Image (spheres, coloured by chain):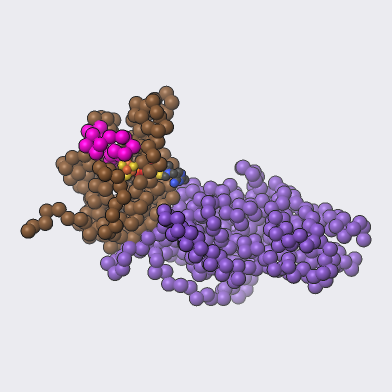
Chain colours: A purple, B brown
Amino acid sequence: MSKVLMKGNEAIAEAAIRGGCKFFFGYPITPQNELPEYMSRELPKHGGVFLQAESEVAAINMVYGAAGAGGRVMTSSSSPGIALKQEGISYIAGANLPAVIVNIVRGGPGLGGIQPAQSDYNQVTRGGGDGDYKMPVFVPANLQEMVDIMMEAFDIADYYRNPVMVVGDGMIGQMMEPIEFKKPVPRELPVKDWITTGTKGERKPNIINSLFLEASDLENHNLEAQEKYAEMVKNETRVENYNMEKPELVLTAYGTTSRICKNVIAEFKKEGIEIGLIRPITVWPFPHKAFEDIPESAKGILVVEMSQGQMIDDVKIANNGRLPIGFHGRSGGMIPDPQDIILKVREMLGGVK
Amino acid sequence: MAIVYDKSKGLTDVELHFCPGCTHGTVHKLVAEVLVELDVLEKSVGVAPVGCSALSYDYFNCDMQQASHGRAPAVATGIKRVNPELVVWTYQGDGDLASIGTAEIIHVAHRGEKITTIFINNAIYGMTGGQMAPTTLIGQKTTTTQDGRTVEHSGKPLKMAEMLATIDGAKFVERVSVDTPTNIRKAKKAIRKAFELQLSGKGFGIVEVLSTCPTNWALTPRDSLQWLRDNMMPYYPLGNFRTPEEDE
Ligand SMILES: Cc1ncc(C[n+]2csc(CCOP(=O)(O)OP(=O)(O)O)c2C)c(N)n1
Ligand code: SF4
């Protein structure tokens, strides 16, 4: 198939439709508005339903209802809106419902700004909602990867009966890049015999629920979820290891920040200095093994984020005290400057080299 | 021998947990009977709220979803939009519907969402132990208005039926009570009409049911019914506020 040039948010919407999305519930927020706008126009043409909800809270609960009724459903929003959806996401996870949530991140806290940021790492990986739940969180670095993941996301959600989050910083939402819509590797999806479509007098009632008043029942429910999460860790952890054969230092960054890091690596190559990059494509599950496998040549890890330091906590856990860890972060919509990263690398390598 | 009173097929065999004398049970029975009589039980999906009726997903003999606090109308919207041929309804208390979930109930009415809502107004938060609800009456003592609710501090109680009736998409709005056999019959009729409205596809229907909470009102079941008559009925007049016929 030939490549097409599309704006990020619209490409995400088109990929969702091609990935089998039939229902969309959302509430406007910058910088992701082109996504619901595209859905409002295109989803009905594919036999789907777009509905603008009265709030993010309502939207995520519509997603809950629709998922429980068997619909392939998604919502999209940006950071403050995602914060409002967190309760609903916890209920969706608690009731074992498949749904896709897109977060086009903007700077916070509070109303923050509308420029690109990565300051939602904690709220998307730790769950802003209550309880012991997890969901796969994808953090693509370019539009092609974003589109590939979107086309697969609904299958992943259905496969595990779990919410899936796809995160882009505002840059991915706004950029234009040539992309190709490629069908994902098909998964064998379980039959949805648990959905509320009316008993038709043929079966016992189905109940969509996250309430377990008996302590032992709730613990068992949580233990079953843990088994599912272990499967996700095994099957869904994604990472790109770049120039990791014999690095003197390892950069780690995700999303568009990783692209800046690759430019930095190219600069050092000209001087004959090898710098590696570990680029998580999922931040939950976090690619711990990539850090365990860092070669002996490496003298340290430099975490680069568009935040004041959130992923760095996971890097510290993965590193387990082995290597010195440095940090370079910009926030509020400020983009890390390659020159600043270069300076930081030199500093960590021990003065000017 | 002729059977004169029977449990509805619309209810499961799970024992209800409601306190003795609580009219939640009465309303459950009415909803179940209507679903059976309209022959829609098998294509029904009910949405249970957060509150004393949270567990109603175990009591109704049809597909059910349990919603987060106040969001049952949004959940019902999701279900109905996926599957418009289903009969979708919510069952909500006054903390759920008239406090935390006001936005959601107003907007299903606003959209004319083709769902039915059964709204239990018992002038109190039952489940959490008797705190003030937006429907708590002036002077009524609750655990958070221990000297009685005052207008100065908390305003006057919300009249949800009257308010929702101002919204075009709410095509059937009626307030009923279940304090006497006659009123129970009238309540059932209203519930039936609200479901018939959904079947006709004309818009949103809601029945507000004045209900008792003997436990948190600290009254006997019989005194509760009298309290409802003496105090709730004057402020919350029974009657119809909207019928689809009016719009035709
Ligand atoms: C988000 C959230 N806030 C608060 C609660 C606690 N809570 C449980 S039931 C309830 C009020 C229920 O009152 P009402 O809706 O009047 O129903 P009733 O119990 O009287 O039938 C509250 C506040 C909760 N479960 N979730
Ligand atoms: S607390 Fe009140 S509303 Fe709840 S079951 Fe008991 S009597 Fe009914």
What is the span of residues highlighted in magenta in the rendered image?
Answer: B208-229
Image point 61% across, 57% down: which residue?
Answer: A125
Residue A265 in view in this figure: no
Magenta stretch encompasses residue B210: yes
Q: Is residue B38 left or right of residue A51?
A: left
Q: Determine the quadrant in which ligand 1 lies.
A: top left
Q: Quarter of the image for the C terminus of chain A: give it.
A: bottom right
Residue found farthest to the top = B152
Magenta stretch encompasses residue B51: no
Residue found farthest to the front = A216
Quadrant for residue B130, please give it: top left
Image point 61% across, 42% down: which residue?
Answer: A111
Image point 40% across, 29% down: which residue?
Answer: B145
Q: Is residue B111 left or right of residue A178?
A: left
In the image, A49 versus B97, the foreground residue is B97
Q: Is residue B206 left or right of residue A179?
A: left
Q: Quarter of the image for the N terminus of chain A: give it.
A: bottom right
Residue A117, x across and y down, in percent: 68, 51
- In the depicted structure, whether residue A263 falls above or below residue B119: below
Residue B8, x across and y down, in percent: 21, 56
Number of marks drawn: 0
Quadrant for residue B37, please give it: bottom left
Quadrant for residue A164, please give it: bottom right
Residue B65, x across and y down, in percent: 38, 56
Residue A331 in view in this figure: yes
Residue found farthest to the left = B1
In the image, B216 versus A19, the foreground residue is B216
